[in-house]
Amino acid sequence: MSRIFSGIQPSGELHIGNYLGAVKNWARLQHEYDSIFCIVDYHAITIAYEPEQLRARRHSMAVSLLAAGLDPNVCSVFVQSQVPEHTELAWIFNTITPLGELERQTQFKEKSARQESVSAGILNYPVLQAADILLYRANLVPVGEDQVQHLELSRVCARRWNSLFGHRTGNKTEDGADEREQFFPEPEPLLTPTRRIMGLDGRAKMSKSMGNTIGLLESPEEIWNKLRPAVTDPKRIKKTDPGTPEVCNIYHLHKAFSPVATVEHVATQCTTAGWGCIDCKKVLADSIERELVPIRSRAAELAAKPKMIDDALSAGADRCRRLARDTMDAVRDRMGF
Ligand code: ADP
């Protein structure tokens, strides 16, 4: 069975971008693949943080993931820092990754432009990601579109390491050369139909760090207070102006949350100026609510059972530690340690 791996930062609560671009897909894929999902707390410390807050956020991310449909009896869910081999393999990959490749990463450029002082951790973030994935020799990585460039770097890491060290001592090919083995598979992205959700400001992707999100566990009132002023088609000034659904973020959210018939109706009402943007947003709020009600109620049940969450994470870490040790035994051996 092919293996999938994906990670998410413990940013507290999931937002609908994470959910539609990644986690909703994970909940489906766990039944089709050997699935490993990781709360990547070592990634989260590449920007300033409070230790107590990190602890709380790790826990609430686990609650959100299970509420959104991950089943610890079907897949492995664990916390990255519980498996120290992640950082060990990342160090090894750092030594074979040219600096220029990291400096070219779009996310590095964006994140470093927003900060006065840029840590080496932000630059090396995709190398740790490569280690996360390759430690489990995963074949597929279900992520949003924002992660595709990072994943390409993981593929390059795998290829480069394989060509430098991917051979067993003594094994020869027919023409006498050392036999090269694809020890690390080159992982491929698995994208969802809603691969990139824009923020409510309509300018950048929806992201916790941009403050333009809708949280999965927010109340209907909180969601409506964010949806009401959200950016729509910029050319639609008055209610009587016909709109262009394809340029409107609200329409794209309809496509993710509303039934097909509603999406079609929304498009007609928009292009004929039958509805104003507020009418359209009210229907969207109802569709979002339908999807989030069961998630919110599962989260409330899970939040009341902290031991169940801890047990699930610790069973996940036990399994992943075993897999990680096997990989690192082979890596160390082939690299001369
Ligand atoms: P954030 O960008 O909010 O910090 P993460 O970097 O932890 O979120 O991303 C977790 C997962 O969610 C990744 O697979 C990522 O591709 C996906 N994701 C994050 N934001 C979006 C978005 N706006 N649209 C689609 N997928 C997203």
Image (cartoon, rainbow, N blue to C red):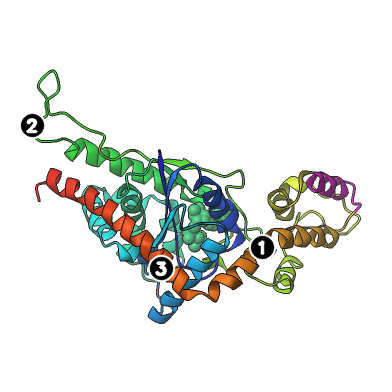
**Residue 41, percent across and down?**
38, 66
Instruction: Indicate which disc residue 56 carries.
Output: none
Instruction: Indicate which disc residue 311 carries.
Output: 3
**Residue 79 visible:** no
Helix, strand or loop status at disc 3: helix
CA gap, disc 3 to disc 2?
44 Å
Q: Earlier in the sequence, mark 3 or mark 2?
A: 2
Give the amino acid at mark 3: Asp
Give the crowd class for mark 1: few <14, some 14-19, many >=20 residues within 10 Å: few
Task: For marks 3 and 2, give the one nearer the viewer.
Answer: 3
Above or below residue 329? Residue 221 is below
Quadrant where the N terminus sits is top left
Q: Is residue 55 left or right of residue 287?
A: left
Q: Earlier in the sequence, mark 2 or mark 1?
A: 2
Task: For marks 2 and 1, give the one nearer the viewer.
Answer: 1
Task: For marks 1 and 3, give the one nearer the viewer.
Answer: 3
**Point 46% across, 77% down: residue:** 56
- Image quarter of residue 289: bottom right
> Which residue range is magenta in the image?
261-274
Q: Label 2 belongs to which residue?
A: 170
Whether 256 is among the magenta residues is: no
Instruction: Indicate which disc residue 294 carries.
Output: 1
Give the amino acid at mark 2: Gly
Helix, strand or loop status at disc 1: helix
Helix, strand or loop status at disc 2: loop
CA gap, disc 1 to disc 3?
23 Å
Q: Is residue 4 left or right of residue 87?
A: right
